[in-house]
Image (cartoon, rainbow, N blue to C red):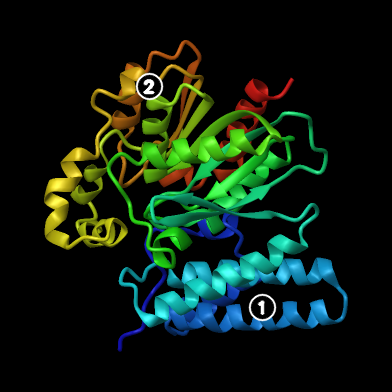
Amino acid sequence: MDSRSRPVAQVPSRLLSGGVDFCDYLRLQDRTEAIGEDWVAVCEDLGDLAAAHARRALDAGHLTTARLFFRNAEALYRVGQYGLTELTDEKLRLYRNLTDSFAEAARLDDPPYEEVNIPYREFAMHGWIQRPARVRRNQPIVIVIPGATGFKEETAAEAQYMVDRGLAVLNIDGPGQGVTCYFNHGYLEIEIERAYRVMVDHLRADGRFGEIAISGRSTGGYYVARAAATDDRLAACVINGGSYYPAEILNVRPWYVRKFAILFGVADEAMKDLFPLMTLDGLAERIACPLLIVHGEADPIFTVEGVQRIHDEARSTDKEIRIYPGAGHCANGSETEAYSGMADWLADRLLP
C-alpha cells in the first residue's frame, strides 16, 4: 500500500490550533514528509506514545501532565483518522482511541467537563459541557456544532475561547457527526434543526442555564443557520466557514458525495436527491437573532458569496460579516484572531 500523506484540509495552522503539540507537529513533518512514512500509521504511533506517557503520569499522580498528554494523544489520533472516509476497522479504532483520550483529559480538567447524552429519535447525541471556573446564576451557554469531518473533539479548542470569557459550552456531535454517527448510529437529516431544538429543550430543562446561543463551523455553519431561522429561543448565532448551499463543495471535492452518504446513512446514489434539499433558500430570511458570520477570503470549498447571501437575507438588526484576508476554510491561517473575536462577540451579547 502506498504511504498516505497529510490530508489536504489539515493545513499547519489547523493542526496546531486544533491541539496538535508543536513537537509532535515537527515529528509528523519529519517522518511523513522528509522520510515518507504513512501519515495514518505515524499519527497512531505518536498517539500511542502520548497516551502511554499520560497513563504513566496519571499513575504517578501528575494530573496536569496526564491531562496534557491525553490531549496530545487525542489530537494525533484525530488528525490520523481525518482523511479516512470509509468506516473501516482502522478508522473506528483510531476514532475510539481519540474519544477515549479526550474523555480522560476532560475528566482531569478544572472544572471537569460534564459528559452528556441527549436522547433524540432512537439514539443519543453525545457531547460535553465545558464550564468556566466561575459559574454564574442563569449561566449563558453556547451550543457548539462541528461540521462534516472535524467533530466535537476538534471544536473543543475553539469552544475554550468562549469558556475563557465566562461562557459555558455544550460541545456536541449532532446527527451525522462523530460519536453520535459512528457509534450511536444517529445519521444526518435534512431538517437537522429538529435535533438542535431538542438540545435547547435539554438545556432549558436543566435549570442551570440562562440564554442559549449557537455556533457552528464549516457545514455546521449551515446547520446552525437553519436552527437560528427556526428557533426563536436562540439568543445569538455564529457561522464560521458556513455555506448557503453545501453542495457547492462538490465543485472542488466531488468525493464528498461518498462522505455525506455515510453521514446520512444512505447509498451514494441517494445524495443526488438529498443535496438539493440542503439549502437556506427560504430560511436565511427568517434569521432574526444577533448574527456573526466569519469566513476566510480564500476558502477553497465554501464561497464568500454564499455567506454574504446569508448575511444579506437575514433580517437580524444586529448582524456582522468578517472576511479574513488570505485565510482558508473556517478562517484557517487566522484562527487566533477569528476564534477570539467570535468569543468576544458572544460574550458581549450574553454576559451582563
Label 1 sits on a secondary structure element that is helix
The N terminus lies in quadrant: bottom left
**Residue 288 occupies quadrant:** top left
**Residue sitting farthest toward the top:** 317
Residue positioned 48% across, 20% down in the render:
320
Residue 108 location, quadrant = bottom right
How far is mark 1 from mark 2, CA to CA? 43 Å
Camera-side residue of 267 and 30 = 267
Q: At x 70% / y 54%, what residue is drawn?
A: 113
Disc 1: CA contacts within 10 A as few (<14), some (14-19) or many (>=20): many
Residue, far bottom: 1
Q: Which mark is residue 326?
A: none
Q: Is residue 46 visible?
A: yes
Q: Pointer 1: what residue?
A: 50
Could you tell which of marks 1 and 2 lies nearer the N-terminus? 1
Name the amino acid, label 1: Ala
Residue 257 lies, in percent from the top left, at: 21, 57
Is residue 333 positioned above or below 50 on the image?
above
Residue 25 visible at all: no
Q: Quadrant of the C terminus?
A: top right
The residue that appears at 16% across and 40% down in the rendered structure is 276
- Which of 118/331 is in front? 118
Q: Is residue 248 above or below residue 99?
A: above
Q: Mark 2 — residue?
A: 311
The amino acid marked with disc number 2 is: His
